[in-house]
Amino acid sequence: MFDFVRVTCAVPDVSVGNTYFNKNAVIEFIEQNKASDVIVFPELCTTGYTCADLFFQSELIKSSADAINEICRQSTGCKAVIFCGAPLTVDGMLFNCAFCIHRGKIYGIVPKTFIPNYNEFYEKRWFSSASELKSKTISSKRSGFGGDYEIPIGTDIIFDVGGQVSIGCEICEDLWAPIPPSSTLAVSGAELIVNLSASNETISKRQYRKNLVKHQSGACICAYAYASAGAKESTTDLIFSGHSIICENGNIASENDELISTNYALTADVDIGKIRADRLKLKTFKDASSAYPGITAPRRVFIDKSDFCGDGTRAGISKLPFVPSLKADRLSRCKDIFDMQVMGLKKRTEITGGKLVIGVSGGLDSTLALLVCAMTARKANLPMTDVVGITMPCFGTTNRTYNNALTLMKTLGISYKEINIKKACLTHFSDTGQSDSTYDLTYENSQARERTQVLMDYAGKVGGFVVGTGDLSELALGWCTYNADHMSMYGVNSSIPKTLVRWMVESVIEYDLFPDSTEVLKDIIDTPISPELLPPDESGNISQETESIVGPYALHDFFLYYVLRYGFEPKKIEYLANIAFKDDFDSQTIKKWLKNFYKRFFSQQFKRSCLPDGVKVGSICLSPRGDWRMPSDASSAVWLEEI
C-alpha cells in the first residue's frame, strides 16, 4: 500500500552443523513473520557460519540442500520473499550463497563475491568467489532442490517483486569492499538491498558497521536490510553479535538494541516511494550508470506477488518530521541551525555594513530572528547597540506581547525604540476610505505594511538594513502580507519551519546563550501564535490565533515536508497524516486542512517568487533562486480533485 514494503531481519538460534535444528528454526521464523513482504536471514544459516572444515564434508552440504528443500516446501503458504543463507557446490567449487525463495520455488541464488581471508577470517579455505563462477543457471533437479526448472545464479540478479520493489542481494564482506556489489545493483535499479551477514563483534565494530550500512543506504539511495548471525554461532574464538539494521536512504528505520543478540526478528515498513522520489530528483544517481561503463545490465527475475503487507504502520512516521524526537539530537540540530543563521547574517553584515534593524513583536518568529541578530553582533565583535529593535504596537497588541518585546530587547542590551503606528494607520484608513471598525483584510494588511515602511525608513535613517522574521511555514501558506512582513533585506528564518521555531528558542535557553533573557524567552514560548492584527478580547488577551484560521502548523509542516521533500500525491500524504496524528485529529479534520494547504500553497506562490535572500539550513527550502521554481499561476485542481 502506497509503496510500503514490510521487511524483517530474522536472527534465529543456530546449532552449528545441525541442519535439522537450523531448518526448523528458519521455518518457525517464516511462520511467525508471514505478514512480512521480505524476510532476510543471516549468512549460512542452514549450517551455521562457523562450521569451518566441516564445510568440506559432503554430508553437511547435502543436508543443507535438503534443508533448503524443506524451507521451500514450507514457504508455499507464506506471502514473503525469503532470503536464506546456505552453501552450494557449483562448477566444482563451493560458494557461500543467498537463496531467494517464494511460495515453494527458488527464484535465484546469489554467491558471495568478496571472501575475507585476514585477521580472524579464513573463508578462502572453504569458499570460492562469485567472480570464479562460470554457470549462469543451475538445474533445480540435478542440484537436489526438487522440481525441474532452471535457477538463475550470479551477482547480477535483481528480483522484481510484483512490480512494487526491485531487490538486490549481497553477503556480509561484500558491503565492506571499496565498491560493493550493491552499488552496481542500485544504479541498475535495485531499490532494496538485502545483506545476509555473519559479523563477529569487537569493540567499536557495531558503530562502524552501523555507519557502513547507513552510508551505503544513503549513497545508493536505497533501503538496506542487514541481518547478521547471532550469539549461538560457535564461540571457539569469536562472538557473533546478531546485529540487524534496516535503513532507508541513510536513515535508520529500525535496529536491534542489544550488543549481543540472537533469536529475534526486527521488522520495519520501508517506503520505496521515498527512494523513487529521490532517485528521480538527484541526477547524479542516474549519471553514475553512464560514468562507469563497466556496469552491465542486470538479469531481472520476476516474482509474482500482489498481496503486499507493508502499510506504513511499522514505518515510525513522525508527526514532526522537522524536529528530532530525542532531546540531545534536537538540541544539537537547533544549535547547528542557529549557527548557520548567524554566519549567514554575519557575512551579509560584512558586505553591507550598517546596523541590523528588526521589528520585534514579542512573538516566536521575531524573537528567534532577534536572537540571531544579537549573536551575529557578538560573533562580529560589534557593539550590541548596533542591533536596533523596533516594537510597533497597534490595534491588536496585547500587554503580554508588548511587555515581552520590551523586556527581551532590554535584557539583550540592544538599541530599542517604540513607534506606535495607530495614528499612522488611522490616517491611512481615512485616506483610503477604510472604516476602523471593519476588521477585514485591508484593516489587517494596512498595519503590516505600515510596520514594514517604518522599518525600511528607519534602516535608511541609521544606515542599516532590515532583517526579516518570516518563517518557512508562513511562506508555504502565504500567511504574510505582500510587501509587508513578506519583505526585508535578509530573511534569517526563511527556511525554518514553524514547528521548529519554538525548539530553536528553547535551545538558546538550554545552551544559556543569553542568560539575562531566559525568563522572558520562556514566556514568549508559551504565548499563542498570532499576528495580533485584530483588537484583543474583553480580558485583553489575544483574540486572533493563527492556527484557528489557517490550521494547525503541525499538520501544515507535515504536509509541506512530504509535498516538497518527496513529491507524494495527496492521498498518500493524507494516509500518512492519519497514521501520524491518529491520537490528535480525526480524518475529516486532516482532510479539511490538507485541502486548505494545497489551495494556499498554489495561490500564494507569487509571494515566494520575489523573496529576499536567506540561508538554506535544511532539505526543504522555498527560495525561487534555489530549491523551488513554480509558476505563480499554476492550478491546484488536480491535487484538490484527488483529495
Image (cartoon, rainbow, N blue to C red):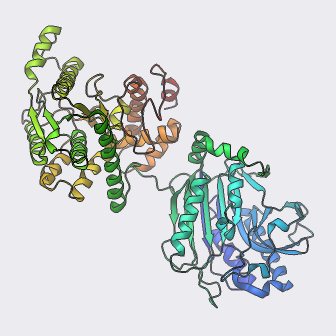
Q: Position of residue 487 (x, y in %)?
A: 29, 27
Quadrant of the image occupied by residue 22:
bottom right
Q: Position of residue 138 (x, y in %)?
A: 89, 64
Q: Which of the pair 435/112 is nearer the observer? A: 112
Decide if residue 456 is on the left or right side of residue 335. Answer: left
Q: Position of residue 606 (x, y in %)?
A: 40, 22
Residue 122 vertical position relative to residue 488 in the rendered view, above or below: below
Decide if residue 511 is on the left or right side of residue 543. Answer: right
Q: Which of the pair 291/495 is nearer the observer? A: 291
Q: In the image, what residue occupies the spot 54% across and 78% down?
A: 261
Quadrant of the image occupied by residue 499:
top left
Residue 157 vertical position relative to residue 469 in the rendered view, above or below: below
Decide if residue 537 is on the left or right side of residue 76. Answer: left
Residue 625 vertical position relative to residue 568 in the rendered view, above or below: above
Could you tell me if residue 17 is visible in this image? no
Could you tell me if residue 100 is visible in this image? yes
Q: Which residue is most to the right?
A: 142
Q: Position of residue 364 (x, y in %)?
A: 23, 42
Label tally: 0
Q: Which residue is most to the bottom?
A: 236
